[in-house]
Amino acid sequence: MKGKSVFSPAEAELVRELLHKVRRADRDEQKKLRNRLRKDVGFYISDFTRSNAGFTEAYFNSLVERGTIKIV
């Protein structure tokens, strides 16, 4: 795991916000947003999926519900 799996409530909200924006952004903007996820929050999508289908805010929420990602 490159990043972390435990986030503060503020960090989790930022992850959700950035994931929401990634789905609606063009390719260049997506790269910038994913970089912010990594650098600003320590969230690496590749730590939680290998799929090319796209990591969504809903999938993040499901990982929180399952306890894979913790918010403290």
Image: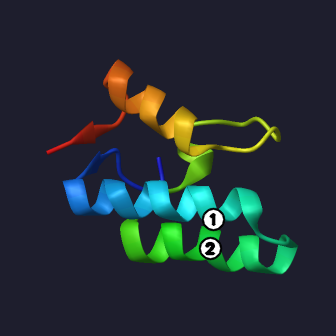
Residue 67 placed where, x, y %? 31, 24
Residue that carries the numbered disc 1 in the rendered image: 21
**Element assignment for label 1:** helix
Is tag 1's residue or tag 2's residue first in the polypeptide sequence? Answer: 1
The picture quadrant where one finds residue 27 is bottom right
**Cβ atoms at labels 1 and 2 below 8 Å apart:** yes
Q: Is residue 44 visible?
A: yes
The residue at 75%/44% (across/down) is 54
Q: Is residue 8 visible?
A: no
Q: Which mark is residue 33?
A: 2
What distance separates the C-alpha of mark 1 from that of mark 2?
8 Å
**Amino acid type, label 2:** Leu
**Residue 71 vertical position relative to residue 29 in the rendered view, above or below:** above
**Residue 32 vertical position relative to residue 47 in the rendered view, above or below:** below
Identify the image's colour scheme: rainbow, by chain, secondary structure or one colour: rainbow
- The mark closer to the camera, 1 or 2, is 1
| View extreme (left): residue | 72
Observer-nearest of 23 and 28: 23
**Amino acid type, label 1:** Lys
Crowding at dot 2, Cα within 10 Å, few <14 / some 14-19 / many 20+, comes out as: some
Observer-nearest of 40 and 15: 15
The residue at 34%/44% (across/down) is 5
Residue 12 placed where, x, y %? 33, 54
72 displayed left or right of 32? left
The residue at 51%/67% (across/down) is 37
Where does the C terminus fall, quadrant-wise?
Answer: top left
